[in-house]
Amino acid sequence: MTTISPGAAEELLRELVAIASPSREEAEAAAFLVQWMRAAGYDEAFVDEAGNAVGVVGTGESDLILLGHIDTFRGFPPVQVKGRLLYGRGSVDAKGPLAAFAVAAGRARLRDDARVIVVGAVEEEAATSKGARHIVANYRPACCVIGEPSRWDRITLGYKGRLLADWRWEGGLAHSAGAAPSPAERAVDYWLHLQSRAEEHNRTIDSIFARLDVSLRDVRTYQDGVNGVAEMTIGFRLPPGLDPSEAAEMLETVEGATIRTRCAERAYTADKNSALSRVFRRAIRASGGSPRFLYKTGTSDMNIAGPGWGCPIVAYGPGDSALDHTPDEHINLDEYLLAIDVLTTVLETL
């Protein structure tokens, strides 16, 4: 067990947030975290073939993987501390949870047969999950914790699935005074039709987690010679039981249009009563909290690791996920320290 003071834990997070690491530009942040883990007394710390920062504590054969991500959403608002609030990109999503993982693993007194592997994965925000896919292919843990903000006293058990669709229409231009719809109108008509399909699907569904959500992620129109072009990126958030291939069938063809789908992920829901979940609940209560479960409408690396490993799994981490990707992203440092206490108890209990 390494002595890592609260001040040192906060300094780790501040320094990690201060290093810009948008998806595919994580190398500097990964190298910094590896250096910190080595100085903290980890048995191993290295950057793997995918670019992930990996730290190992313990030499046993029973693995617990703490799978966070070190990449962030684009943009880099000023990093600053106001009272007990740390502002900056990644403070919540998800360097706060990742730093909490790193400190807890460095503090915990592990059983002789245990080994904890901390991962700062790359490209979680890029929808490729390159880092997580590499870890899933190369390890076989007894259980896993995904590093995502859920507040220190809440446990996330499920994430919706995902499908992205790139829609493109191209055709001859017509005078704006004529009867032919413009490329922009064709795109709007298609989007409204897709919205109505989703509304019909959800007509008898009350649960937010069980609904099919569609969003217009991007739209643009332009001229290409004598042709007009309209392009859209449409996002599906898929509930449990709805396969990405079924969602793709909603994308009806339109004359002159092409559709390309990508980033397909199925929804995943973890076991509420697993041993891992029970240990987290006890650890939260021991720190004075009342544990609650969450099911989120986004995706995370749980969508990769859950079905890939089939082991007990939850997502956990400090921070308010409503602040993800916003210019106002910030984390309460007291909550961050509470999450470290919870994680340390979990590691020592498991």
Image (cartoon, rainbow, N blue to C red):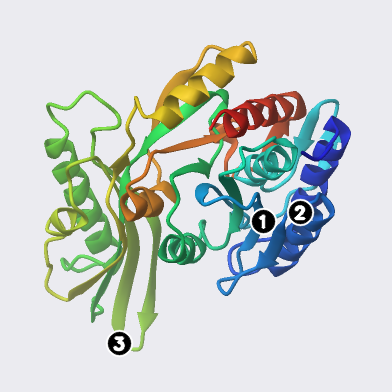
Q: CA distance from mark 3 to mark 2?
A: 59 Å
- Residue tagged 2: 37
Please provide percent x and percent y for residue 67: 54, 49
State which tag comes first along the sequence, 1 or 3. 1
Q: Residues within 10 Å of mark 2 (few under 14, many from 20)?
A: many
Q: How dense is the environment of label 3, judged by Cα within 10 Å: few (below 14), some, or many (20 and up)?
A: few
Q: How many discs appear?
A: 3
Instruction: Name the one closer to the observer, 85 or 136.
Output: 136
CA gap, disc 2 and disc 1: 6 Å
Q: Which residue is mark 3?
A: 226
Three-letter code, disc 2: Met
What type is the residue that disc 1 sits on? Gly
Q: Secondary structure at mark 3?
A: loop
- Along the line of sight, which residue is nearer the eye, 15 or 284? 284
Q: Residue at x 64, y 45 (%)?
A: 98
Q: Secondary structure at mark 1?
A: strand
> Which residue is farthest bottom?
225
Is 213 positioned to the left or the right of 313 in the image?
left
Label 2 close to label 1 by CB (< 8 Å): yes
Q: Which residue is mark 1?
A: 55
